[in-house]
Image (cartoon, grey):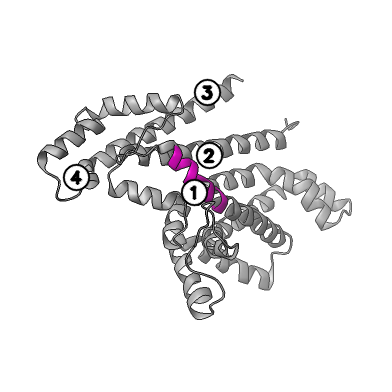
Amino acid sequence: MISVARLIIRRIALLIALLATVFVAIDLLPGNTARAVLGRDATPDRIVAKEHELGLDRSLPVRFADWISGVATGDFGRTARGRSINELLADKFPPTLLLGGLALALTVAVSLSLGMWWAARGGGALRGTLQPASTVAAAVPEFVVATLLIMVFSLALGWLPAVTVTGRSGLPTSPDMLMLPVLALAIPQTGWNTRVVRAALLDAARSPHVESALLEGLSTRTVLLRHTLPFALPTIVASFATTVGVLLGGSLVVETIFNYPGLGALLAGSVADRDTSLVAAVVALSGVVIMIMLAAADGIRGWSLRGRG
């Protein structure tokens, strides 16, 4: 219990340090928040008044302390344009969560299948295909994958839409509008995780109990699922948990490319306005999601390691 509490405290402290870094980074950006909100024609007096209204005339540590104390009570404050950040997050986060969740599900399903297949039958032509394909997929950034998908499936073939249209619910009006953004996120992570799954399974296969199971004449499938996979699970789950953070970061870029109605556009606008509170709120929300997934991964890892001396 003590070690778990320390781990939670450490992660919360790291998140707070990251949020403080965000405050400093946004404050160092060129431009003026009040002028960005009021426009280029704003008079100096109006800019000074707006800065006072937004609290920008206070020191950065004081502003951060005031903001983080509000976050502790569940209040992210208001944007530089006067809108409730809580309401904006409640409106924009579900679409991002949907996009990232679908990409994660696809990544887990495909990388587990390919990784297990590769580990069990990893010779000859299969290795010659999956090894370079997974390397290329893992190395290509999401925005490049998104651009290629648009060129092929939207512009050349006309099969799928390149732009997202939303309904009253704030979600895409048609499921096919999710396909290209999900693929753009999932393809790089599938390439990476397929290699992780294969490596973890091959490492676990060297264990004495796996060799004993093979000598007993058990089928390859039984040995893989019952004797090899449980020992490889901690490494695989840790990789998937790390993937959550990468998917959230990548979704902000992919959403912008596909005009997807999530946190991407919200973050882009907040950076343009130098809206420190809104940028930090997006980072905080993403950090909480990643912390939850890491905690789940720790739980699964502990479960898979139970009974091992």
What SS does tag 2 mark?
helix
Mark 4 → mark 1, Cα distance in angstroms: 31 Å
Q: Earlier in the sequence, mark 2 or mark 4?
A: 4
- Judge left or right: residue 230 versus residue 25: right
Q: Earlier in the sequence, mark 3 or mark 1?
A: 3
Q: Nearer the viewer, mark 2 or mark 4?
A: 4
Disc number placed over residue 6 in the picture, else none: 3
The residue carrying mark 4 is 35
Disc number placed over residue 248 in the picture, else none: 1
Q: Nearer the viewer, mark 3 or mark 1?
A: 1
Residue 259: % across, % down: 44, 60
Mark 1 → mark 2, Cα distance in angstroms: 9 Å
Give the residue at x 33% y 25%. Answer: 66
94 up-or-down from 109: above or below: above
The reply to whether discs 1 and 2 touch (Cβ–Cβ < 8 Å) is yes
Give the residue at x 78% y 46%. Answer: 227
How crowded pointer 4 is (Cα within 10 Å; few <14, some 14-19, many 20+) is rated as some
Q: Earlier in the sequence, mark 1 or mark 2?
A: 1
Dominant secondary structure (helix, strand or loop) of the stretch shown in magenta: helix
Q: Which residues are magenta?
A: 87-99
Task: Say which of 165 and 63 sits in front.
Answer: 165
Mark 4 → mark 3, Cα distance in angstroms: 44 Å
Kind of residue at disc 2: Val
How crowded pointer 3 is (Cα within 10 Å; few <14, some 14-19, many 20+) is rated as few
